[in-house]
Image: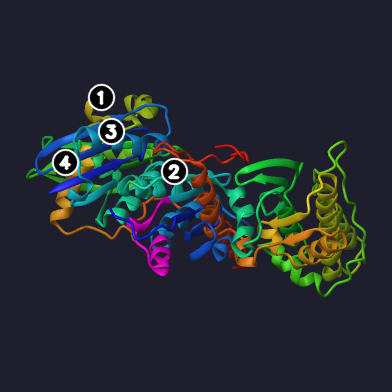
Amino acid sequence: MKILALDSSGLVASVAVVEDDILVAEYTMNYKKTHSQTLLPMLDEVKKAISLDLNSIDAIAVAAGPGSFTGLRIGSATAKGLGLALDKPLIGIPTVDALAYNLYDTAPDTLICPIMDARRKQVYTGIYCFENHALKILKPQDAVPMTELIEELNRTGKSVIFLGDGVPVYRELIEETCHVPYSFAPAHINKQRAAAVAALAQIYYKEGKMEDAADHQPDYLRVSQAERERAARLAKEENADH
Amino acid sequence: MEKKNEDVLILAIESSCDETAASVVKNGRTILSNIISSQIELHKLYGGVVPEIASRKHIEKINQVIEEALKEADVTLDDLDAIGVTYGPGLVGALLVGVAEAKAISFAKDIPLVGVHHIEGHISANYIEHPDLEPPFLCLVVSGGHTHLVIVKDYGEFEILGRTRDDAAGEAFDKVARAIGLGYPGGPKIDRLSKEGNAYAFDFPKAKVDEAPYDFSFSGVKSAVLNHLNKCRMQGEEIVAADVAASFQRCVVEVLVEHAIAAAKDYKIDKLAIAGGVASNSGLRTAMEEACRKHNIGFYHPSPIFCTDNAAMIGVAAYYEYQKGTRHGLDLNAIPNLRLGER
């Protein structure tokens, strides 16, 4: 089974091709350039370097959110275009799940806690551990205030590994308020990697969790600002009426 | 893969604002399909286009729209000579969806990619129904985001004579429509209401821009309308919305016509086209047609379906760019403030 995976959900742009238990190629960059200019040229380089026949791919996997709204759409639109042109199914992988999968088979009593900066004092996060060599989701990915997350982790009493682009933003807060043992994942596994997206996608593929390219869209975990403000205004008007 | 015939077939994709659109165009002037998924109903709730909502809707619809365009044209991706896509100007998040999608298809099927300027698309809409129209000609582009008076010197070659200094013409329509309670989008609603009103009930000021005879300014006339409405409300006078709409529309149309005709005469151009969403305004069409007839200028305008955003016009523009050798790479980016003629 051959999976082509893309991740442009955050600052990292990453492309990978995984065939069965072999990572054939991975190209990951964490640099200022915009994903719309880098992602496809990166894929093109990978394709040329490994003489990839795009038609030999079984599915196209993409980090499907949460993340930067624009970044997610660049990844999704690229995946959808590939899916349409190659007539291949898509597999949308929750971004935070894929981040957690970087730390495969961590000791069962250790929690994995990816944090992505979601602005407005929130992080996109989830709480995970590994059980019987499988990723177990203890708290599904969501947008959560960072202080709330730390309180929740403190209540578990378990040690935790943090990773993700939220670490530099909240390192101080963690150091001040996190009372359980914690550590920060090192550079090679602390950000999005398309290889992890591909590896999780292999499991999804076997479980039949594919979607038609036409139906795929990112899971933003948040409504747009305009919708949020409109909902708040309507709720206010509703209250005023009663 | 072997191509079926000698025709040049282009798939075009447009997602610069609130319309997700795809089209297949043959030899630059024959529209084989023109699929448009409009989001207007969604944005009405907010009184205007919300960029994030527009972008989300684009990604939801884009594959269906493209598949429908191919199916209706009865072609496959293997038949295509190029993919044209709008890469500016427009809403960056919205543009990016079309650009990323087009690049991915171009990459996967090894089809040449041609980035298209949205306004070049609007101008090119005139070629669809006027097989005889060829450059040079003068074009007035009027929409919710743009007001340009342009000499089309050749395919893809432009000289901008004038542009708006503040609001786009369509933007002024939207703002006035909101002020008299008509809602979004304002252009068609004002146009309809104008037919019931007295266009000479009020004389709103028509601003001239010093030393730039072809430039436009619509914030003055818009403010004058808003002030008039405020004054009526303060003094408890009845507001005759139809008269306000008709007078406002007349003032805007008169400026557009005067500038366009003056430019045509100054530059001795005997063909004048209009393009963009406001080009479907019946008041503008009638007035421009009359003025052109009076001055012996040939008048061209697209059908309303080709005035508002669509991908057919992008396909037409892409064809002429393709013929000139324009190709874009996989690093093509969306450029929200792309200038006309820039590549």
Which label sits in the foreground, 1 or 2? 2
What kind of element bears circle 4? strand
Measured from the top left, where is residue A28 in percent x and y? 28, 31
Q: Residue at x 75, y 68 (%)?
A: B282
C-alpha span from label 4 to label 3: 16 Å
Q: Circle 2 sits in a helix, a strand or a loop, which is it?
A: helix
Say which chain tag 1 marks. A
- Disc with the residue nearer the chain's start (2 vs 3): 3
The magenta region covers B66-82
**Residue closer to the observer: A54 or A205:** A54
Q: Quadrant of the C terminus of chain A?
A: bottom right
As measured in the structure, the alpha-carbon distance from the residue carrying label 2 to the one carrying label 3 is: 23 Å
Same-chain status of marks 1 and 2: yes
Q: Amino acid at mark 2?
A: Thr
Amino acid, disc 3: Glu
User: Where does residue B169 sit, x and y in percent of width and height?
Assistant: 74, 53
**Taken as a whole, is the magenta stretch helix, strand or loop?**
helix
The disc, 4 or 1, on the residue closer to the chain's N-terminal end is 4
**In-front residue for pair A90/B52:** A90
- The amino acid type of the residue labelled 4 equals Val
Gap in Å between the C-alphas at discs 1 and 2?
Answer: 25 Å
N-term mark: 2 or 4: 4
Q: Answer yes or no: are tags 2 and 3 on the same subunit.
A: yes
N-terminal of the two: label 1 or label 2? 2
In the image, residue B67 lies in the stretch drawn in magenta: yes
Chain to which mark 2 belongs: A
Q: CA distance from mark 3 to mark 1?
A: 23 Å
Residue A187 is marked as 1
Q: Quadrant of residue B128?
A: bottom right
